[in-house]
Image (cartoon, rainbow, N blue to C red):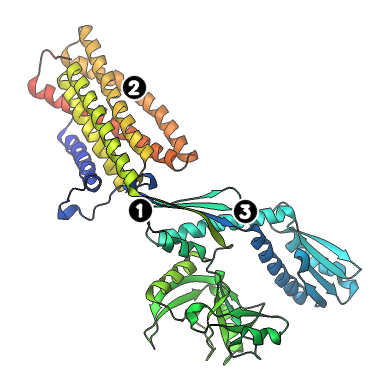
Amino acid sequence: MLDFPLWKRISLWAVTLLLAVMALPSIASLTGTALPDFLEDSPEINLGLDLAGGSHILLEADPAQVADQRLETAEETVIQLMGDAEPRIAIGELTTLGGNVSFMLQDSSDIDRAREELRDFINGTGIVAEWSLEVLDGNRMVLTQTEQGLETAVDNAMESATEVVRRRIDALGTREPTIIRQGDNRIVVQVPGLEDPQALKDLLGETANLEFKLVHPSRQNEMTEEAARADPIPGTEIVPYAEEAGLPGMVMVVNRLGGIQGDSLTGAQQGFSPETNAPVVNIQFDPSGGAIFARLSTENVNRRFAIILDDEVISAPSFNEPILGGSAQISGNFTVESANNLAIQLRSGALPVDLTVIEERTVGPDLGRDSIVKGGIAMAIGSLLVVLLMIASYGRFGIYSTAALVLNVLMILGIMAFMNTTLTLPGIAGFVLTIGAAVDANVLINERIREERRRGRRVVAAVETGYKEASRAIYDANITNFIAGALLFLFGSGPVRGFAVVLIIGLFTSVFTAVTLTRMWVAGWLKAKRPTEITI
């Protein structure tokens, strides 16, 4: 157990020194010390919101918007299903007044066929029906959203919105944001290091709901909203131009149904127009979206189509020729920054619901710096007291324990930097706890060696037996601590997980330094000096 061949010593020292060196950039960053050139690009520990400051934003969605979206989807589905039936089911008046989808059957004998066509849509994909169907006056069918179906839709929308928010923030390059749902319709966003949240709010507040809709053939030119409303056309909607389009007060009249939704996109990148060198957004469709876009462009050459983002027209070009490659270009009065932000929004997907900022807090870094300083003082005082106690109690073996303790702290920092984890205020508490727990192993080992010497064992035998027997208790204790730390990490959030990360890493490094490294050092000393007596 005390045999350490050369290859093993080299390996242990290599791992130890590598992790210790990886801790230097984080230490330099925390203390404001300059680094050598070769370490400038090394990974560093991220600081959490409580240490680095940053932005806290609470977003809220309106469940009523989900209900309205479901009504529009149901309207399109009814039209499609009735039209695709064999033979076609003729329907008359179709309305969505009162939160229901109501339509007339021109032939009352088609009720059973219509009910069968709608069965899968009504039942949905869950275990409860998403819609209820009622027949009135013999030929009017009314679809009503069930409470369970709406609740499921709201839950799915919030899950999707949370994921979209996460992808958008990740695309900004921020480190270790916290994005969690709160309640039924709220999302908490915490971004460390971001002191001005306006850009973040602008990005998160945009739904990025992209649509391509054909302009009505009799309304191919821009017009004022008053003129459009004075002569309404059934089956169309009036969409205003976005401010950046440079056409204030003008609108386009587009077909309300049909077109292509932004969920058919597979990619979006900021680029430049080859003709004008102006910033644009290049987009790519999936196979089904590309096929629809190709059909629309083929059947409507020389007709205009509106590119609608969040219910505003950003441009309305014409199909000069069929577009068959599954890609297109969005142009407008973009800057490079606005085009890049739009590309991020489109790549991350459309928010299924609008998110409103209802709470906003900016945490300054001063509190974090104060916490780091006080945490450092507590750790320094604790370490000094532990070092004095260990050296006074165990002499040379106490010095080995002290060296192991220092390397333990450096290795924790190095591993956290390598894993790109975040240090929080509870994490600092975990550091202080680790310092005390790290020497427990050495206390057990040293006391067991002392006990073996009292029993009359020789020095080498006492040391070997002390490490062997104490290691069993050390491993058992750390396994139970690891289970507790893993459960904290899996089921905790925020500060609790920050504490668990330091605890788990500290368990592995403390066993490595307190048991393996000190045993190697003791073995080397015994081999070199061959003492007949030890003071411990």
Asked if marks 2 and 1 touch (Cβ < 8 Å), the reply is: no
Q: Is residue 335 left or right of residue 183?
A: left
- CA separation in Å, label 2 and label 1: 44 Å
- Quarter residue 200 falls in: bottom left
Quadrant (top left/top right/bottom left/bottom right) for the C terminus: top left
Q: What label does residue 155 carry, if any?
A: 3
Residue 322 placed where, x, y %?
A: 54, 88
Q: Amino acid at mark 3?
A: Asp
Residue 144 visible, this orientation: yes
Q: Tell which of 515 and 456 is nearer to you.
A: 515
In the foreground, 19 or 134: 134
Q: Is residue 69 left or right of residue 478?
A: right
Q: Label 2 amino acid?
A: Arg
Earlier residue among tags 2 and 1: 1
Q: Which residue is mark 2?
A: 472
Which mark sits nearer the N-terminus, 3 or 2?
A: 3
What mark, if any, has residue 193 been given in the picture? 1
The residue lying at 26 percent from left, 15 percent from top is 448
Dot 3 or dot 1: first in sequence order is: 3
- In the displayed structure, 60 sits above or below 10; it is below
Which residue occupies 33% across, 24% down? 474
Image coordinates of residue 70 in percent, x first then y, are 68, 64
Residue type, numbered disc 1: Gly
Q: From mark 3 to mark 2, how far is it between C-alphas? A: 49 Å
Between circles 3 and 1, the one closer to the viewer is 1
Tag 2 secondary structure: helix
